[in-house]
Amino acid sequence: MSAVEQVTRAHIVTDSPDDHVVVPVALRYDPEADPRSVRIGLPGTVAPGGSGSPDWVLERDLLERGLRAPASSGDVHIWPCGRVQAVVEFHTPKGVAVVQFDSSALVRFLRRTYTAATPVSH
């Protein structure tokens, strides 16, 4: 089993209509380290309880459910936004980061994680 990493672009949602910030986001899955979780590396944020790490760890199942209907667990909330986008909301004691992804990038990443998690039989 091998780790999966995918870099995609996401929009940081702000309350300013003129401020569309596009950032690179690293999606990671390591079935040997934690087969049930994925990591989202979001620049400019610090995950709660982290040592300054910008990586948010969430259940892979939560990400998948959030692409179909609103889903949440702890500090992370995910919901579909129209037919082609998904919103992920990260809560910290310092505030909230709202990030909009193309759903197709998240679906592609999830498919790769299931392939990586399936052992190949000889």
Image (spheres, helix red, strand yellow):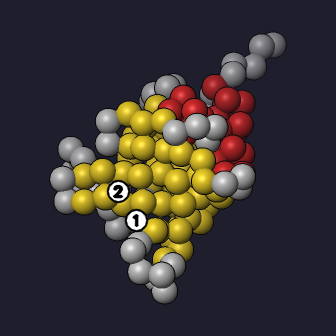
Residue 38 left/right relative to 43: right
Reply above or below: 73 against 84.
Answer: above
Residue 73 left/right relative to 113: left
Residue 65 left/right relative to 55: right
Crowd band around label 1 with a 10 angstrom C-alpha radius: few (<14), some (14–19), many (20+)? few
Residue at the spot 53% in from the left edge and 68% down from the top edge:
11
Q: Say whether marks 2 and 1 touch (CB < 8 Å).
A: yes
Crowd band around label 2 with a 10 angstrom C-alpha radius: few (<14), some (14–19), many (20+)? some
- State the separation of the CA atoms marked 2 and 1: 6 Å
Residue at the spot 42% in from the left edge and 36% down from the top edge:
72
Give the image location of residue 41, x and y in percent: 44, 55
Residue at the top extreme, as displayed: 122
Q: Earlier in the sequence, mark 2 or mark 1?
A: 1
In which quadrant of the rendered image does the N terminus lie?
top right
Residue at the bottom extreme, as displayed: 18
| Amino acid under disc 2 | Pro
Residue at the spot 48% in from the left edge and 60% down from the top edge:
99
Name the secondary structure under disc 1. loop
10 vs 50, nearest the viewer: 10
Q: Say the numbered circle drawn on residue 54.
A: 2
Give the image location of residue 29, x and y in percent: 54, 39
